[in-house]
Amino acid sequence: MKARVTVTLKPGILDPQGKAIEGALRSLGVGGVTSVRQGKVFDIEIEGGDRAGAESALKSAAEKLLANTVIENYRIEVGGK
Amino acid sequence: MKSAVVVFPGINRERDMARALRLISGRDPAMVWHADSALPAGTDLVVIPGGFSYGDYLRCGAIAARAPIMDAVRAFAAKGGLVLAVCNGFQIACEAGLLPGVLMRNAQLRFICRDIFLRVERSDTPFTRGYNAGQVIRIPVAHGEGNYIADGETIARLEGEGRVLFRYSSPDGIIDPNWNHNGAMNGIAGIISERGNVLGMMPHPENHVEASMGRTDGRGLFAGLLDHFKAAA
């Protein structure tokens, strides 16, 4: 089963990398960009077809390692096949 | 003073640290591998040195903080054992929950490798008894992620409980954004845990301990620790 964990900075946490990317987009002439926040995406394969079990395993993965919950939020999506 | 230096893959300051400990305490530290599950019996001081553990993958210090030896380090700290965590060590200590907060990318996005000035805020801790409160010391830094942040409540507690031991300052001890080279909140360069037995700091005191290094401002930290253990013995 495919799954995805997306980790993003909490609102209000300064993101200097996002700011630099935002500036670069502006200098490339990409119009209309008002803000960029950089995050991380983890594509994870889980064995078996137990959705609830997968969600609980991924929650534990996110809490224990993938996200630092002092500064980051995470979102779990357990996909199709 | 029996010290143990924890070694993770990708760490590169462990030998500098071992040299400083040997020079000042007259005793070789034990080098403890990350996959070990115990510290040597009778360890007085655990040091988590600087470097780039696991290539800074995921987040600085995140993988090292979950290594087997860290359970032993947490247990040692929980019993009141002294832990010195420098640079990547500070990042590891935060990720391991030994200290609050996070070290974020430097505000100006550049890796900084030079001497900076630190104001020592207190002299009544085992880590700073070799200095005077208010004293300014010159110590090298080498980091890309040293920008200390924590939520408002945590910062208020750190300040209220006097847990900030070192702050980036001018050569005269003035705390000013111009001398805060990485954007850390309140110019925080080093903090101690609630019990006062874990110190995390970004600058490298081990790199200013002998005349050939240009300066010896870092000696006070190690000499103070040695005095602490002598006084306790």
Image (cartoon, coloured by chain):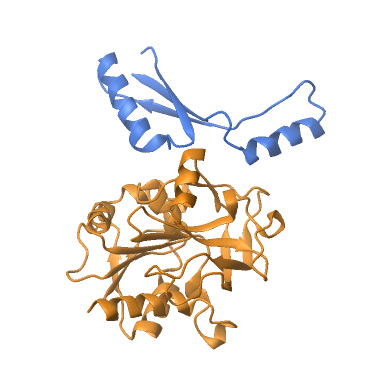
Residue A66 in picture, x, y percent from top left: 40, 35
Q: Residue furthest front?
A: B160
Residue drawn at 47 percent across, 50 percent down: B160
Q: According to the colouring, which chain is orange?
A: B
Residue B154 in sight in this render: yes
Residue A60, relative to residue B7: is it above or below? above
Residue A63, relative to residue B129: is it above or below? above
Residue drawn at 39 percent across, 53 percent down: B93
**Quarter of the rendering containing residue A65:** top left
- Along the line of sight, the residue nearer the viewer: B4 or B179: B179
Q: According to the colouring, which chain is blue?
A: A
Residue B104 located left or right of residue A1: right
Counting labels gives 0
Q: Residue furthest top?
A: A80
Residue B140 located left or right of residue B9: right
Residue B227 in picture, x, y percent from top left: 34, 80
Residue B113 in picture, x, y percent from top left: 62, 64
Considering the image in quadrants, where does the C terminus of chain B appear?
bottom left
Residue B58 in sight in this render: no
Considering the image in quadrants, where does the N terminus of chain B appear?
bottom left
Residue B109 in picture, x, y percent from top left: 65, 48
Residue drawn at 46 percent across, 78 percent down: B220
Residue B93 located left or right of residue B147: left
Residue drawn at 35 percent across, 51 percent down: B98
Residue B136, relative to residue A53: is it above or below? below
